[in-house]
Each structure stands twice: as C-alpha cells, then as structure tokens.
Amino acid sequence: MGQAETSNPQELSGTTLPPDVIGASLEQFNDIVMVTEGKALPDLDPKVLFVNPAFERITGYPPEEILGRSPGFLRGPGTSVAELKRIEAALAARRPIRAELLNYRKDGSAFWIEIEATVVTSPATGADFFVFIERDVTERKRAEATHREQERATAALFSNLPGMAYRCLDDEHWTMEFVSAGCRDLTGYEPEALVRNRDTSYEEVIDPEDRKGVRDIVSRAVERGDAFELTYRIRMKGGQLKWVWERGRTVPGPPGAVRRLEGFITDITERKLLESQLLQNQRLESIGTLAGGIAHDLNNVFAPIMMAGDLLSDKADAESAQLLDVIAASAKRGAELVRQILLFARGMEGPRIAVSPASLFNEVRTFLDSTLPKSIRVGFQIAPNVASIAGDPVQLHQVLLSLAVNARDAMPTGGKLSISASNAEVPATAPRPHPDAVPGTFVRIDVADTGCGIPDILKGQIFDPFFTTKGVGRGSGLGLSTARSIVKAHCGFITFISSEGSGTTFSIFLPTSDIGLTPPAHGEPSRAPSGPLPRGKGESILVVDDEESVRHIMRSTLENFGFRTVGAADGAEAVSLLRASPALFQAALVDMQMPGLDGSKTILALRHIRPDLPIVAASGMATQENKEAAAMSGVRHFLDKPFSVETLIRTVHAAMAKAPA
C-alpha cells in the first residue's frame, strides 16, 4: 500500500483552495502588499515585482508606473535614513522586522506607514524575495503628535502656574497619582517623592493641627458631589510653614471604583501676611482713635493743674510750695505718659531733620554698652554711602532701643545682637513687602538677634498693643506697638522674620532725607528765654475753649499778668462776640478740638471778621494734622496742652508782637 499524495499545497483536510482566492484576497486587502527582488544591499537596488490595489489607493501611483522600479521613489526629505539602514540590515540578515517610515505620495503629500518586512524564498527557484506589508498610520501618528503637544502644553502651563496641580486617590492618605512640577516650589519635595507616597504622603505635608479640618471639609464636599475650596497650612520639607489655598473636585469614574480627586494648590502665605497686617492696622487705628480721645481729655485735665500750681507757687508758704511742687511734678509726669500714648496711637510728629545713621548708631551704642549684659555681643555695621534719614532723632532712638531691649529679653543666656544700615529701594513694579510700603528710596535698618525666636502662633500678635510674652511687671506690651507707630508716622514700615530657636530680625524701612531738610543740630540745646515774664497792659484776649476748667484757668492766668479776658464756650459764641465788638480784642486763644464749630473753622470765621487779629491755637492732641489746619488758617503760634504759665504768657506776647513762632 502506498502513501496518499499530499504534494498539492492547496489541499487542506480534503478541501481544495481555488487558485484565485489568494489574488482576490490581495485585491480586497486594505494594507499595501509589495514584493521586490531580494537584493537588500544599497548598491543592488531591488525592483518592485508586485503591488496590490491598495498601493495605488494610498500612494496615488498606478502599478504600471512602479513595477520594475526601486521603491526608493517613495522616500523624501523627512524619511529617516537611520530607519532605512535598520530595515536593510535586518533583511540582509534574513530577519523579519517592523518599522515606521515617513513616505510621500504622488501628489507630494507625506504619510506615515507601519512596515512589516520579511524574506521569502521560492521553493521552485531558490530565489529570495522581500515581502512588505505596509499599513497607513498617518492618522494615528497625527493623534500621537497632538497628544504629545497637549502634554507639552499642559506641562508648560503647570510649570508657569504658581502652584501645584494634582490627581489623587480618595483613600486614607490621598495617594497621589500625578503632581505637577510646581510641587517642588510649594512643598520642597520633588514631584516623584509624593507620587504613590514614595517618600511621603501629601497628608503628612499638611500641618498636623489642620489635617482633621481639611479631611472633614473635603469628605463632606465629596459626599455631596460638590467642588471644595479651603485654606490651610503645610510644612515644607525644610520645616517652613506656609499657607495654601486649594480648589478640587471628584473625578467621575465607573461604579465601584475608588474615587479620585483632582485640583490645584497654591501658596497664599504672602496674602495671609498682608491680610494679617491689614487687620492689625485696622485694630491699631481703632485703638489709636480711642487712645487719642482719652489723651485729649487727660491733657485738658492736666492743663489747669499745671497752670494753677504755677500761679499758686508764688503765693504759698514754704510747706505749701513743696506740696505744689509735688502736684506739678505729678502733672508733668502724667502729661509725659499721655504724650507716649499719643505717640503710640497717632505717631505724633516731632521735628523732621536729616538724621545720619552713623550718629544714630553712636547714641544707641553708648546706651547699650552700659545696659546690656556682657553675655550679649553687640555689633554695628553701616554699608558704604548710606543716605541720611528724614526723621525725629529722639523717636528713632526710642525705636532702636525698644527693639534692642526685646532682643536682650530673647537672649537670657547670651547671644549676639547685630544692628546694620543699608540703602534699599522699593520699586513700583515689585509686590509690596508691606501694606504701608510705597515705591521709593529707603534706609533699611536691621536689628537681628540670635535668641529664642517667635513661635508661629504668636507672629500675628506681636504688634498688638498691650500684648507681651514677658512675665508680670516685666513689660507693658507697648514697645513694639509704639515702635511701629513711630515708623509709620515717619512714612516708613517695619517687617520681621523669625524662626523659633534661631532668632529674629526686625527690618525698619525709613524714607531718605530730602535736600531741603534741616541738618542735625550741634552744641547746646536751645533754652527758653530767661528773665521775668512780660506783663500785659490791659489788652483784651478772647479765650475760646469748650472745657470750662481750662477756660477758667487760662483767663485767670492771663488776668494775673495784666490782661483782660472774655471767655467763649464754643466757636459760635466766639464769632458772635467778635462780630459784636470787632475792635475790642487784641488777640484770641482758640482750642482746636471743640464740638460744632471746631478750631480751624472758628479761626477762619474770626479771620474773616478781623484779618489782622493775632490768634494762638491750642490742642490737647497736637497732631500734625491739627498744626497744619491751624497753619492753613494763618496761625503761626501753637500751644500743646498741657502747658505752663510761662509758655502761655510768652506765646501770647509773641503772637501779639508778631514774633516768629
């Protein structure tokens, strides 16, 4: 028995494959099928022997134009030479290969093809042929390019945003699946450190005191399907505390899948600082208004005490004179305390002269050398060509001493206190370092210590009046408040940086002096004129003050020194008196704070009736605004309550004689 014949390759399980099936299949094939000579080397350029109809549909070339030619005509300027060499090398080694090439159609347009090439050997002749199956992947490549561009644009967008975009699982630790490059600036961690909680989780970055609150807000919003917004604190990799604002939402997904969250987190530390400073400004302004009113009333209380004491001292016996001296000294002490309150509340202005930082530092150095313990080393440094400051040297001296005393208390076991001065510029284009900052040229004075630092929780309160961390009896809580008020009155501002355990640096920014400012005075201080007080010759003085006790003591004092007086309880009464007898009065003494017709309006009305009438203005709250209001009305002489008998008499005589203020 012989074996059954199986030489016909078209017989499969007793079924014969018709010869035209393969051809029909190739006709309908959507991909290009191309057969060339098996000459892979570049110098033996293979010729195209067969293409199916898909070739013409895709390339635009009919078979009669390409058979017998090398397929190289499909190449163009964008075709990868390296990829061609890789294909040639694989075919030369008789290995199948997959590749992607950019080819060109008959009309010159480019298209991408995915090639699968292999070597086929003819059983009949032993000749080699290259068979290429080529698929048009232009749309896929275009989609990939579009996707890459979108990813690039998204990455560029995220990199330029001042914050961190994220996507995370809504699980126990908010496991991050994606964080943008802004993570680095926001948290101090590389993005890869947070993805999949590789080095830490974002939950660990949130300040421990805020974690529960953040979790509760996010959970409630997610359960309701709402977007969420919240503000909280984070701890950077280096331990620094930051305030951040986050907005996020849930990402829709299939039922039963773990929910995902996505959103954006940005640093708002500077904004929170500015908000805190603004609220502090508002609190201080409110307290300042209250303190100013109290100070005004107290000055009206001390004024008659001081003048009455002066008047009685000449008539009293020795024992009574001693008691009057005690009363006068107490009144003066109270008046000085009121002046300090006004300095804190309103930043009362003293003389503005050109103050040299070097001379200011020399005065402070002398004081500190005699008061600071030897365990604290003090260093002063002035940068070259530092400008002079426009200010009151006495008040600036007080600011530096207040900061130095605080530094001493922060270093109970010793340390270093550094005080330095340099020029500084606040440009118009930069973010403001402080709500009170305006563009301009400043002198910056830094007072730095190596003490215990300020805890983060207290940083928003240190400028609040009466706030102190010192023990009972060791501090009033007005030091920093008064320093800040003085600096603000000088049109400057004060900032600070502090790390708990690493010390504190206060930076004072003060405007530089103008060319026209008075230079610092040298030599002996000016003294009040000596000799007996001048007396009046019966001149009539109009005394205008709403405080009866003040009005009474001023009238008594003036009459004691030879004047005649007429009193007015308010501005309207004063105007009526002058209008009734314009020639009766030789001078007027007007209080600036009165109900109804205030001092400045009263002065204008009196001037309208008698333009030549000498007027002295007085105020229990001698702010620059009051002095300027009086000066605008033509008043050259101003009395700060409380004042002495001597000051009153000499000022009235100077006004009547039209002497300089």
Image: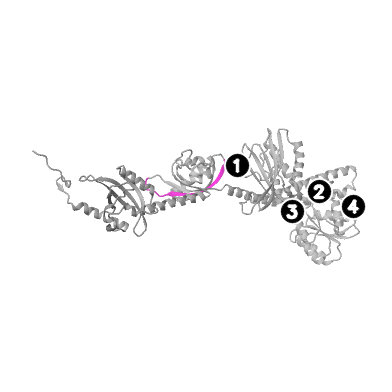
Spatial CA distance of label 1 from label 2 is 44 Å
Residue type of the residue flagged with mark 4: Leu
Which residue is denoted by mark 1 in the rendering?
Answer: 457
Q: Nearer the viewer, residue 464 or 160?
A: 160
Q: Badge 3 local density, few (<14 within 10 Å), some, or many (20+)? A: few
In the rendered view, does 559 fall on the left or right side of 453? right
Callout 2–callout 3 Cβ contact below 8 Å: no
In this rendered view, identify the residue nearer to me: 584 or 263. 263
Can you give x and y, in whole percent of width and height, for residue 384 in the image? 71, 45
**Magenta-colored span:** 240-256
**Splitting the image into 4 quarters, where does residue 61 fall?**
bottom left
Which quadrant of the figure contains the N terminus? top left
Q: Earlier in the sequence, mark 2 or mark 4?
A: 2
Q: How far, Cα to Cα, is label 1 from label 3?
A: 40 Å
Q: What residue is pinned by disc 2?
A: 521
Judge left or right: residue 373 versus residue 75: right
Q: Which callout, 1 or 2, points at the residue further toward the start of the chain?
A: 1
> Position of 134 compared to 523: left or right?
left
Residue 646 image point, x, y percent = 86, 51
Alpha carbons under labels 2 and 4: distance apart: 28 Å
Q: Which mark, by number, is residue 533? A: 4
- Depth check, mark 2 against mark 4: the one in front is 2
